[in-house]
Image (cartoon, rainbow, N blue to C red):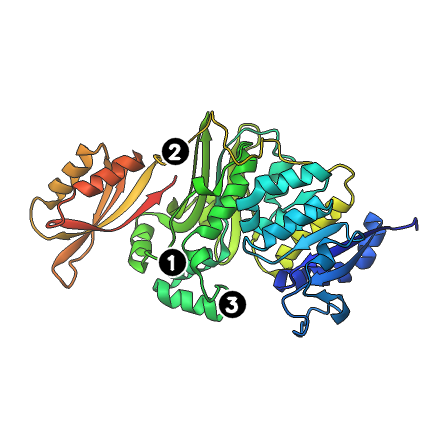
Amino acid sequence: MNELKEIVIGFLGCGNVGGGVWRLLENMREEIARRDGLSIRVKKVLVRSVKKVRDCGIPQGLLTDNPDDVLADPEITMVAEFMGGEHPAADYLIRALENGKTVVTANKVALALNWPKLQAAAEKTGAGLYYEASVCGAIPVIGALRGSLESNRISNVMGIINGTTNYILTRMSEQGEDYAAVLADAQRLGLAEPDPTSDVEGFDAAYKLSIMASLAFHTRVPFEKVFHEGITGITAIDIACGREMGYVLKLLAIGKRSGDVVEVRVHPTFLPKDHPLSMVGGSFNAVYLKGHACKEMMLQGRGAGDLPTASAVVGDILEAALTDKHRMPTFSNTEETDSALTFTDNWTTRYFIRLSAVDEPGVLASVAGCFADAGVSIATMMQKGRSDDGRVPLIFITHPAEEKAMQAALRKLDPAICHPENVIRVEE
């Protein structure tokens, strides 16, 4: 066997993903040596407490609570980061890149909010910046967008890119359970964080969409431009009514580009039951996209978890180690967005509307009139049985309408006659 190329790595953080990366590197050591000609040595692992007992097998002597042991060691040429959150992770990553160390990160927050600074530091020293694990865990969506799909003009990217919310909505749909009960069970099972805000309010998916849409559309899509709305207002009644009308509910990350107009949004979305994304259940992730050359395609798999995410990290480590000149994205990655682009908040889609209305003649005509005055056309209507307070639930599906027209229609409704219980966007 030829002499192996040694890669000395430092870890920033050592939670579930860091432990998974350690186990993969150790278990695949012989394969990596034989297949890739690499000897990968982890020299230091930054942790909060060196006294904490860890079950991943990392030797105690590698642990440190001093970031300089990783960031300032000239022997360490690559840094793998698993800390999560924006700070201090982003600061450490910038320092590593400024010191010429290639960075591999699973941190969508630090990347989405600091991407221009990270890339500028990498370009200045010639270091690499790799982030496959930041979006959809083991699903190679970043590699596809940066590689085989780069020659496409992608017009549409839609994804189920948060496993926690997909698990919750799947349970609510299949078993008719309420949101609060399913969330509590997901927390008990470790599928939801003790503070689930980032997941259930759509922040997590919005960070990921910022990264994914930037690569798909070959332009910087800042996190601040991503509209996000969570699932906390979704009820079992909404899901059941949607199902009767042929729809399945998902928290979708949606990016569309038409010419110089870009829309990026995360929100609960009804999809036709035969749409490929409707069939993605549990904690699985999937990304569905359209390109002018590749046409329609979907990538699906494990979007979270220690080993699925670790597999993407190790893949990046190996790619970086075997690369002489690191590639950067095709677009101008600066704080300022392309002045030729318009990021719109007035997208066009269908809408599911559930109203609570008084049970008397003329209500339907009043509602239809308010919608018509705002330029919103009703495609389907369903009335459910009377509720305990004597009001009746009315459910509508509209024809495609602009977001601002829909909001204007809702404001026109007379609260003495009816009021919206929920409004959910519908994609075809």
Q: Residue at x 45, y 56 (%)?
A: 198
Give how far across and how far down residue 288 sits, in percent: 51, 41
Q: How far separated are the C-alphas under marks 2 and 3?
A: 37 Å
Residue 152 seen in the figure: yes
The residue under label 1 is: 173
Query: Is residue 105 visible in this depiction of the protein?
Result: no
Q: CA distance from mark 1 to mark 3?
A: 20 Å
Find the distance from the CA under tag 2 to the CA under tag 1.
Answer: 32 Å
Judging by the rendered image, the residue that carries numbered circle 3 is 190
Q: Secondary structure at mark 3?
A: loop
Mark 1 or mark 3: whose residue is earlier in sequence: 1
Place of residue 293 in the rendered image (x, y in percent of width and height, measured from the top left): 57, 28
Asked which quadrant contains residue 25, the reply is: bottom right
Write the residue at 41% across / 68% down: 184
Q: Residue at x 62, y 57 (%)?
A: 82
Residue type for callout 1: Ser
Mark 2 crowd level (few <14, some 14–19, many ≥20, 10 Å Cα) = some
Amino acid, disc 2: Thr
Q: Give the numbered dot on residue 344.
A: 2
Specify few, some or many for label 3: CA neighbours under 10 Å numbering under 14, 14-19, or 20 or more. few
